[in-house]
Amino acid sequence: MSARDLVTMPRLGLSSVSPDGTRAIYTVTLTDEAALTRSTTYKVKTLATGEERDVRIREDASSIVFLDDERIYFLAPGGRNSKGMQVFTGILLSNGVVAQESQVTRVNRSIDGFKVSPDGSSVAVIGSVPRECSVFACSSETPRHMPGPGTGMLYDGSDGFVRHWDSYETPGTFSRVFVFPIENGRAQGPGIAADGPDGEGALTGDTPVQPFGGLEDMAWGAKGDALYFVARQSGATEPTSTNTDIYRLAMGESVPTNLTAANEASDGAPTPSPDGKWLAYLAMERPGYESDRMQVMLRDLATGQTRSLTDDFDRSFGSLAWTPDSRWIIATAQSVLDTPAFRIDPRDGTVNELDLMRGNEAHIGSVTPAGNDRIVFTRDSIAAPSELYVSDGWGEAARLTDVAASRMSALAPVETERFSFAGANGDTVWGQITKPSGIDGKLPAILYVHGGPQGSFNDGWSSRWNPRVLASQGYAVISVDFHGSTGYGQAFTDAINRDWGGKPLEDLQKGLAAALALDSQIDGDKACAMGASYGGYMMNWIAGNWPDRFDCLVQHDGLFDMRSFYYATEELWFPRWDFGGSYSEQKALYERWNPVNHVDKWQTPMLVITGEKDYRVPYTQGIQSFTALQERQIPSQLLVFPDENHWVLKPKNSLQWHDTVFTWLDRWLGDDSE
């Protein structure tokens, strides 16, 4: 498997299941082999027979979803008296043709996303709208942070974020939700602001929550009589706050109600039950901690009484869905190296893991009930990218799609072995070895270090850091879920707090030794390490604290100087939690785990990669580490992407990233290595 195979592999996208559970629409993203340009196609699958057809719809359509068994809604560029993307509807016939297409919204502002109420009486739309506007297509567009006459952007201390993830903020303008009633297939009126009127004490914030929130941040009640949405109050404290709340706007009212005001930590994923009695959602307990355990909460919509369903179940959940009869909640959560689905009883909180796949569950996502005991979901693994599956009667699932399966089967296989060992404090730590199958002779070792740091290199597919494509170059890829990783209980995740360079490094050292002892084919005398974000930090930390172990390092978007990082990053709640406060409050701790303090011991050749639009770990961190390498005359290279953020997403850039990394590894691990 080559880097070009990875970049051009067809990708399964979003899916929508018809309410009667008979059909599923899904998207496939294709990448042209030569031009590396991408396009999206739509398929409709009949679940009972497996029959599949192309959805014959206008080429510029996106976000197709079922409302009922035939009617679909989607986004497309609008016609006259409208601007940008608008909501359309049509009937999806059995042959895949979309008939009776008509434009639902007709407003002079582009719509970024939408959800139609279950009864089709209303549509909630998302768009970038100034907070002062009471209607969706408001004409007040003068950005107050650009007063002129020059191009300078002027920010006030009360604005909060100046920049976030990969873009500068526009103070006063937010991603907002507006509700339009639908009559005779047309949206009526100027739209009702879900966040209510502007003014003192008003809700002011983004829905979906930026930068990664999606349509899971918004949900209609079962009868279409209320809209639930997630927002975080903006302002000077937003960069230090994880306090997202769930709001309820009752139809006919103009001001939303904050349902989770009592919890100052994160609340999200509002999921009303189909019978209209309950609201399930996810919540954390500790304010300021973005990686706290997500518990499944249940609110009685009649009384307001709320309780945790999973207080005694030590896993952090990531998605929720009700079965149509409101009998079960289906949720997903990381567990060891898998992300399985769980069935939760809302009556008493009993949690049962569903055994849906023969062998390892790997990574299950996008779970959609298609009946009271039938679910449609996606599943991917290190071995293969995502495909759509269906499970009947909670039993072993069958694959529905062949988006990439046939193409993957034509490539040389790899094998992945899970292993565990006694890590720091004697705790059990898990890892994986991925290597090409059927290869004789020794394989150089690559130590993979994941980011987060509260994350995992679990058994899942990645279009960026992909163990299979790296192993296919002739390496044994070793990943270790060090202390701080997710999927092993909250105490294990919390263990990295204020200990960034301690237990994690010990786990990596012991994990590499355990992998070498387990698999004699791995050549421990030829080894490189690589990682991004916190994994990149660890490359800088290893350079000064394990300097004689590796032949080379690959450091992507890594933290180099904790002081300059703190004062340049955007989401300040992250370092404040992990280091117990701000830099000025915890200077000694930041400096204890600061890679820059160990530069005098650096000696390992390093490839440094960074993106100029990375505002999480600003690209100057990479420049600083490259300067340190040059000063010490250590062989080094710097790869800078002017148009990428914390991730490398563009096809041509991804191909360049892989080619550069593979060349670097071959330089130090190949037969003619220096």
Image: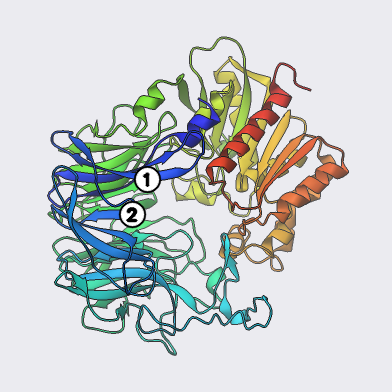
Furthest-bottom residue in this view: 200
- Point 82% across, 46% down: residue: 628
Q: How is the image coloured?
A: rainbow
Mark 1 or 2 closer to N-term? 1
Q: Nearer the viewer, residue 635 or 640?
A: 640
Residue 35 locus on image (x, y percent): 51, 38
Q: Residues within 10 Å of mark 1 (few under 14, many from 20)?
A: some
- Quarter of the C terminus within the rendering: top right
Q: Is residue 507 visible?
A: no
Q: Nearer the viewer, residue 388 or 335?
A: 388
Q: Quadrant of residue 218?
A: bottom left
Residue 365 percent across, percent down from the top left: 34, 44
Residue type pointed to by label 2: Ser
- In the image, taking residue 459 as reference, residue 341 lies left or right, namely left
The image quarter containing residue 303 is bottom left
What residue sits 50% from the left and 49% below the top?
493
Quick one: SS at disc 2?
A: strand
Does residue 305 lie above or below 515 as drawn? below
Is residue 364 in sight in this rendering?
A: yes
Amino acid carrying mark 1 in the image:
Thr
The circle drawn on residue 40 is: 1
Q: Is residue 311 above or below residue 436?
A: below
Residues at marks 1 and 2, CA–CA distance in whole angstroms: 9 Å
Report the residue that reaches farthest toward the top.
Answer: 440
302 horizontally vs 569: left or right: left
Q: Is residue 658 above or below residue 103?
A: above
Residue 92 image point, x, y percent: 17, 50
Residue bearing the label numbered 2: 62
Residue sitting at x 55%, y 35%: 480
Q: Is residue 503 above or below residue 592?
A: above
Number of numbered discs overlaid on the protein picture: 2
Callouts 1 and 2 close, C-beta under 8 Å? yes
